[in-house]
């Protein structure tokens, strides 16, 4: 209960970005408009950190009757790819169900960005530089020493215009010239020391193809993209804090955007314990085969979480519950698990599944007889009704529910002990059979017909209740159990490949599930009693039923 209360409390609180929006509304800065965006670079799949940014930006727009754009920051043609564009659109649609699919590309603004660069040149605020990349780095100075001005800094406007046009027309090779903003080589903020705003790159772009051989740099392009779209609050992560002065410089020097420019607001990135984040690392795991693709259910990608069985509601609730802050911290992955349990607990049917089966024979139950017993679909949600499940002389139970020599407080089956078979009868262990290696292969019990579930029997009590499936009626299934990707408690990137959890995926291929599972479809979610929440995986076929465990039932999460 305390978990739920805390989550609810957080939901109510107003985050610091909403406070800024409220102040803007009072001042009338943007005429009560709220327009946010999520600006991914299409160079990989999105992960749960991006989900945080999406839910935050989308949520702010929604709460304030505003607008939310998905905008691809596709200014770097070397790493971008259309397949990433598609996966990102799919993920954003999934997370934001009533989003109007406002999809934009930075590359659609390349013409405008070029014109704005000319405006800066004409104002004496940008110049073409012939220094090489290495020289530019040398001239930049350090945190403690000022930089040095480029010898090309004071070229006349006309010369800059002509050279920039030549850059655009492909007169020069990669790296031969750049366009730089002319600000202040002595600025204490290195980002203000005449940053490069255009570079030459003879490279085909996924969208503009071979139209351009010069590309705008991120720090120049980003504020323009925001301003062109009329974004009011440009929410990004803390690493851009030092870039904000340049963001503001760009907008304050372009006539179109001087009035009520977009404001950049930074928040702390989401990190999750036991989870590797960062596209670069995830990409490495995919490319080097440490996982089975971007949508491997162990991956913290949105595609991976979806395949694992997470719901968009759970991810939205999780993002909301962890709040927004300026302080970097690692969120316990148990909070994410709490969110999915919380979401599925009342809406998914509960069924019995035996993951590590051993046969139990009820020696006094007539051979060939089948009776149907009633089982509630969700004891905490009676509206979900009930189903009838077959019961017969031979059933499967979990191997761990029988012990020849049990420890104290073991209430399940052992010779002489009686337990309840959930939804059916009491059975008492009379005997067991071992194979030649000494492994128990069969448990023999007798049942008491008086004790049928629902019959009102009060004659005696038993301490243990175990689940089962009728042997002859059960359906074979493969169940994939997943564990955390990283062994480390805290998120740490150094030598992360060595810290991968070798037991993050365990395949059980001899599981027995209820016969009703045959009629279920890919994507259906269930609670397997005592085992957790599961989803039917897309690899399910006529021949093979495959389940992924979404999350176990118990949480280690404490607040
Ligand atoms: P990564 O760090 O995984 O490589 P990135 O920041 O390079 O991601 P982008 O495509 O540039 O990925 O990010 C799109 C948006 O998502 C940016 O506004 C960025 O600030 C935000 N974002 C990225 N990672 C996180 C995170 N862990 N938590 C919250 N927001 C994030
Ligand atoms: Mg990036």
Image: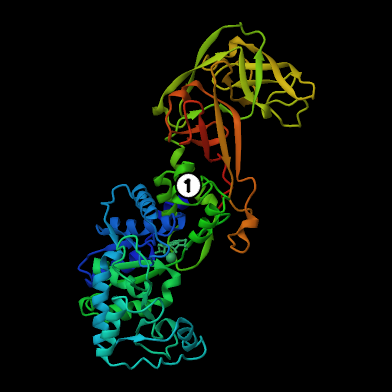
Q: In this image, 375 relative to 95: left or right?
A: right
Q: Position of residue 148 (x, y in %)?
A: 45, 92
Packing grade of label 1 (10 A; few <14, some 14-19, many >=20) is some
- Examine the rendered structure and indicate whether residue 139 appears above or below residue 204: below
Residue situated in front as seen by the camera: 252 or 5:
252
Please identify the quarter of the rendering in which residue 63 is found: bottom left
Residue 419: name its quadrant.
top right
Image label count:
1
Q: Does residue 23 appear in the picture of this structure?
A: no
- Judged left or right of residue 463, residue 353 is left
The residue depicted at 55 percent of the width and 31 percent of the height is 529
In this picture, residue 85 sits left or right of residue 227: right
Report x, y in % for residue 203.
37, 67
Task: Write down the quadrant of residue 46 in the picture.
Answer: bottom left
Q: What residue is shown with label 1?
A: 295
Instruction: Tell me the quadrant of ligand 2.
Output: bottom left
Q: Secondary structure at mark 1?
A: loop
Mark 1 residue CB less than 8 A from any atom of ligand 1: no
Rendered location of residue 265, percent (x, y): 37, 70
- In the rendered view, would you say 173 is above or below 349? below
Where does residue 64 sit, x and y in percent of width and height? 27, 59
Residue 357 in view, yes or no: yes
Q: How is the image coloured?
A: rainbow
- Image point (23%, 76%), residue name: 115
């Amino acid at each position: 209960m305390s978990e739920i209360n805390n989550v609810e409390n957080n939901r109510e609180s107003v985050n610091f970005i909403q406070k800024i929006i409220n102040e803007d509304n009072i001042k009338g800065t943007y005429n009560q408009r709220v327009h946010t965006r999520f600006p991914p670079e299409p160079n990989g799949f999105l992960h749960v950190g991006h989900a945080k940014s999406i839910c935050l930006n989308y949520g702010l727009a929604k709460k304030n009757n505003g607008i939310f754009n998905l905008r691809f920051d596709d200014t770097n043609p070397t790493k971008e790819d259309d397949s990433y564009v598609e996966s990102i659109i799919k993920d954003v649609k999934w997370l934001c169900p009533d989003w109007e699919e406002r999809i934009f590309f930075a590359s659609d603004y390349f013409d405008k960005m070029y014109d704005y660069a000319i405006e800066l040149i004409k104002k004496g605020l940008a110049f073409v530089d012939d220094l090489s990349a290495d020289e530019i780095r040398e001239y930049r100075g350090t945190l403690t020493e000022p930089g040095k001005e480029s010898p090309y800094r004071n070229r006349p406007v006309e010369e800059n215009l002509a050279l920039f046009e030549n850059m655009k027309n492909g007169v020069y090779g990669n790296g031969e010239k750049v366009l730089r903003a002319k600000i202040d080589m002595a600025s204490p903020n290195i980002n203000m020391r005449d940053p490069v705003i255009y570079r030459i790159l003879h490279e085909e772009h996924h969208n503009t193809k071979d139209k351009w051989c010069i590309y705008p740099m991120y720090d120049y392009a980003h504020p323009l993209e925001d301003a062109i779209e009329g974004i009011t609050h440009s929410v990004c992560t803390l690493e851009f804090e030092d870039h904000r002065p340049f963001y503001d410089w760009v907008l304050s020097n372009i006539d179109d955007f001087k009035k009520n420019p977009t404001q950049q607001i930074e928040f702390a990135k989401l990190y999750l314990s036991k989870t590797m984040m960062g596209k670069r690392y995830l990409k490495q795991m995919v490319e080097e085969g440490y996982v089975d693709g971007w949508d491997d259910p162990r991956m913290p990608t949105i595609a991976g979480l979806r395949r694992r069985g997470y719901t968009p509601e759970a991810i939205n609730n999780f993002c909301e519950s962890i709040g927004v802050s300026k302080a970097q911290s690692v969120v316990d992955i148990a909070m994410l698990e709490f969110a999915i349990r919380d979401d599925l607990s009342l809406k998914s049917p509960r069924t019995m599944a035996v993951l590590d089966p051993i046969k139990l024979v009820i020696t006094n139950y007539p051979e060939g007889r089948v009776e149907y017993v009633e089982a509630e679909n969700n004891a905490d949600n009676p509206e979900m009704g009930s189903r009838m499940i077959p019961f017969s002389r031979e059933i499967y139970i979990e191997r761990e529910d029988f012990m020849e020599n049990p420890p104290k407080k073991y209430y399940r089956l052992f010779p002489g002990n009686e337990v309840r078979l959930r939804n059916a009868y009491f059975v008492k262990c009379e005997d067991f059979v071992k194979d030649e290696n000494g492994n128990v292969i069969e448990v023999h019990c007798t049942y008491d017909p008086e004790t049928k579930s629902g019959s009102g029997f009060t004659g005696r009590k038993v301490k243990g209740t175990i689940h089962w499936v009728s042997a002859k009626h059960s359906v074979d299934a493969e169940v994939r159990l997943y564990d955390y990707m990283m062994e480390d408690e805290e998120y740490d990137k150094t030598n992360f490949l060595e810290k991968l959890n070798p037991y993050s995926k365990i395949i059980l291929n001899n599981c027995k599930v209820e016969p009703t599972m045959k009629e279920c479809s890919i994507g259906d979610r269930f609670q397997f009693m005592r085992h957790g929440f599961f989803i039917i995986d897309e690899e399910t076929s006529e021949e093979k039923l495959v389940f992924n465990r979404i999350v176990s039932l118990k949480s280690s999460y404490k607040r």
